């Protein structure tokens, strides 16, 4: 790469203040939410789709890797430059909410909008954007789409991809593709919107999106359901859904997770239970929401819950969600480091997979905390460790391999909402099989023949 | 094509009774639900994915077009052979329900299962497969997936694609691809499941599917809401959804449609209204379902409905749905022929598009009956005509062009649930733009380099 020439060309597109090259600046864009690191050759911050198209044309001309980046909260190292000379394209300056169309319940946004900002803005108008990854305050909608992010509410409402009606994408040759539109149903041609969603920046740079909204639920009821047996908690999840009740959320926390929360926050949780479910129903009508919560609670009791406590005040409700959200930070008190995984399994396989996770933990002598979106079969096993200890990182890597093997053996897969990125690349073919990988490579080759878009991610080995 | 050689090879794969070549047999596979026709060189009826793979290998070797076919109920001529020497692959012998997994709410099926059979089978176990195209009794799940079929219930439940967890696909070189799995969430790699869904047999032959099920709703309440103004009916649709009420169905019928039904069936419908909505709520809890129906009815009255009648008995309810389903057949009393379109528009644009449709009708002097899934913005304008009259077919073609132009001008598109096939091919690039078409061509080229899978459909001109 002729670095100076490329940087000059980028400056002509994005302006001097839109191109970062000092070592301090580059360092700030060399990591994400994982342990991975990689320093880009430059960072460019476009202000428009047209500027982004110009940037891609420069990259294509000079054969320079481009790595799309939102807020860098990714948990699979998908936005880390792994090839030399890579240019990070940061979308944080493209953070406009372009249009809220109340009549059609849609919102048009630029890729760099922070998801919580988008939610707040549409909620002011009585509308609702449901997907709620825990990174919601520090992740962008573009990143959410690139990874098809989930969250607790996705049980009832579906994941990010279920809300993407259309995309604006800069292709590998700098042309601009528009997919989809405001109609809810659309079967005109291949589903390119779904193909680019969850493509992790490897097929095109997502610069804008048209999202579907729903009416903001006016009521929510939240309950804590405590179980002496994790098996019963898991049975309860299936039993609730089999009753035709679809809670907004059905979150599982195991004993270790509950212990960590209680130790950190002193909320008065029973730490002798084996598992708890946080169950939330929501909707337009208070009575209906309450009836659903009560019915779900009854099913939990019938499935062996020791107790079901419905939050009676907004404060109690907030406390339960504070507990759920504090799991991840509270783990820091237990160990200097944690590695959070994101396996997803058939709902019915949760007890068997949890048993396997415990065996892996016991075998290697490192704690695995288990929590996640049980209604979706999406678990976040967090391995606690100390990276400074000799050999511990290698041990964690072996454990991760065993965690994935357990998920695959149960009919599950590597990721429910984080994506593949770099971290799950070694397991990709084992999860999907050689035919699927080859089909994906062909699609990649067809849309990015020069391999400049986030090379080295997903199915592709590092060079 | 060396016809004899190919037929002999097909017989070696599928047996003598699995290959049809007599003119009478071929004639039976030369049409679908449209006016299009095209005679295949042979029809082959595989009994397994492996046989299908063998068939594709023969076709690849001899460069013979393969046209996947379910029950031939398609409304876009997607399963009509348009290239000489084409072989129809009929999946009607692959009609097994392989596994119903109640614990995980999934069903695994072969492509040739009739969708109504699948629904009946899972409903026996308290489960529910929601998509309900009107062809449900005479269309297959494979065809439904290939076109991403919809139906009245898709407002609340989503379309076919929302229920496809995984696919078994024979690729253009005869290899077998498995996509997805039982986990509800899965972001491991590109969304190939969504790419093959709605690809109309042009990227691979779908031989099996893993589908997501939900709990069977125990209660349903149905109401007929009559309006003096179609504009008000359309406003009511938006107002109901804005209230946070999501009915299972919100079906629109215009005055002409209501007149046709009444003339054919004498149900006692008011024929002087300008539009009616059939509104249905459903769910697990009778009170909740009733409250929702009543709330939605109230919103309709507030939006200007002349009357709202909730069906009080199962018989009344069945009557309303019989009315809705009889629109299409009842049109036969009005004119010898009809051409049903399938445009989809932003919900808020329905009044404007209906006005345009009426102008098109007036301009050309042929009736256009309007009904459809108003909650989804998916309208089925049906042009009534007499094909025997000189010049009438050409006039209908011009009208169809104007219908599509009206949909596109309103931000809509060509198809909500029928697909593109042959019939909408001339409008494809106008709807999606040249960049999208080129991206789709590249994907097609990457996955079917010999162009043997349903050539001449979607974006491709007839040779």
Image: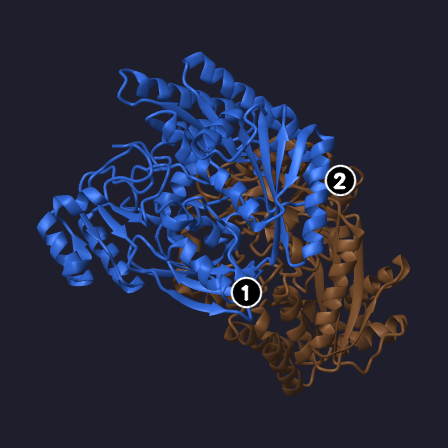
Chain colours: A blue, B brown
Is there CB contact under 8 Å for labels 1 and 2? no
Disc count in the image?
2
Q: Residue at x 86, y 76 (%)?
A: B263
Above or below — where is A113 with respect to B342?
A: above
Location of residue B446 in the rendering, given as x and y in whole percent from the top left corner? 41, 45
Q: Where does label 1 land, which residue?
A: A126
Q: Is residue B284 above or below residue A176?
A: above
Which residue matches tag 2?
B122
Say above or below: A177 vs B60.
below
Residue at the spot x=86%, y=60% of the render? B318
Q: Position of residue B16 (x, y in %)?
A: 71, 34
Residue nearest the viewer, comparing B450 with A300? A300
Horizontal side of B59 relative to B232 (left or right) equals left
Number of other residues with Cα within 10 Å of mark 2, as a class: few under 14, some 14 to 19, many 20 or more: many
Q: Which residue occupies the foreground of this view, A293 or B390?
A: A293
Name the quadrant containing residue B253.
bottom right
Most distant residue in the left direction:
A4
Quadrant holding the N terminus of chain A: top left
Given the image, what chain letter belongs to the residue carrying mark 2?
B
Camera-side residue of A331 and A66? A331
Q: Position of residue A186 (x, y in %)?
A: 56, 60
Q: Secondary structure at mark 2?
A: helix
Please state the chain letter of the residue tagged with numbered disc 1 in the rendered image.
Answer: A
């Amino acid at each position: 790469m002729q670095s100076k020439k490329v940087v000059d060309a980028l400056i002509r597109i994005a302006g001097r203040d839109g191109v970062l090259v000092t070592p301090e600046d580059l360092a700030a864009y060399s990591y994400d939410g994982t342990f991975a690191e990689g320093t880009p050759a430059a960072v460019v911050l476009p202000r428009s789709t047209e500027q982004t198209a110009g940037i891609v044309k420069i990259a294509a001309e000079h054969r320079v890797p481009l790595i799309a980046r939102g807020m860098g909260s990714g948990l699979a190292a998908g936005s880390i430059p792994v090839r030399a000379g890579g240019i990070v394209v940061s979308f944080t300056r493209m953070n406009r909410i372009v249009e809220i169309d109340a009549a059609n319940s849609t919102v048009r946004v630029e890729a760099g909008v922070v998801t919580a900002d988008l939610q707040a803005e549409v909620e002011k108008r009585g509308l609702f954007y449901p997907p709620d990854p825990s990174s919601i305050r520090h992740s962008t909608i573009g990143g959410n789409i690139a990874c098809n992010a989930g969250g607790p509410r996705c049980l009832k409402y579906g994941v990010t991809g279920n809300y993407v009606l259309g995309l604006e994408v800069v292709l590998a040759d700098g042309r601009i593709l528009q997919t989809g539109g405001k109609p809810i149903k659309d079967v005109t041609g291949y589903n390119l919107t779904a193909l680019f969603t969850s493509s992790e920046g490897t097929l095109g740079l997502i610069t804008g999106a048209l999202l579907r909204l729903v009416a903001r639920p006016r009521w929510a009821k939240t309950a804590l359901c405590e179980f002496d047996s994790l098996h019963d908690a898991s049975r309860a999840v299936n039993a609730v859904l089999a009753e035709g009740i679809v809670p907004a959320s059905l979150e599982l926390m195991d004993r270790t997770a509950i212990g960590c929360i209680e130790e950190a926050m002193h909320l008065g949780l029973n730490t002798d239970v084996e598992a708890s479910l946080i169950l939330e129903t929501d909707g337009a009508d208070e009575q209906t929401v309450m009836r659903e919560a009560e019915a779900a609670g009854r099913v939990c009791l019938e499935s062996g819950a020791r107790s079901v406590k419905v939050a009676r005040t907004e404060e109690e409700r907030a406390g339960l969600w504070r507990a759920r959200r504090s799991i991840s930070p509270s783990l820091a008190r237990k160990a200097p480091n944690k590695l959070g995984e994101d396996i997803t399994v058939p709902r019915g396989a949760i007890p068997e997979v949890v048993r396997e996770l415990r065996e892996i933990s016991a075998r290697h002598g490192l704690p695995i905390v288990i929590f996640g979106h049980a209604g979706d079969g999406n678990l976040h096993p967090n391995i606690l460790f100390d990276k400074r200890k000799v050999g511990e990182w290698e041990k964690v890597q072996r454990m991760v391999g065993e965690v994935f093997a357990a998920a695959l053996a149960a009919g599950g897969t590597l990721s429910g909402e984080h994506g593949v990125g770099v971290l799950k690349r070694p397991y990709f073919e084992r999860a999907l099989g050689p035919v699927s990988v080859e089909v994906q490579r062909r699609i990649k080759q067809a849309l990015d023949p020069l391999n400049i878009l986030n090379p080295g991610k997903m199915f592709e080995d590092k060079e």
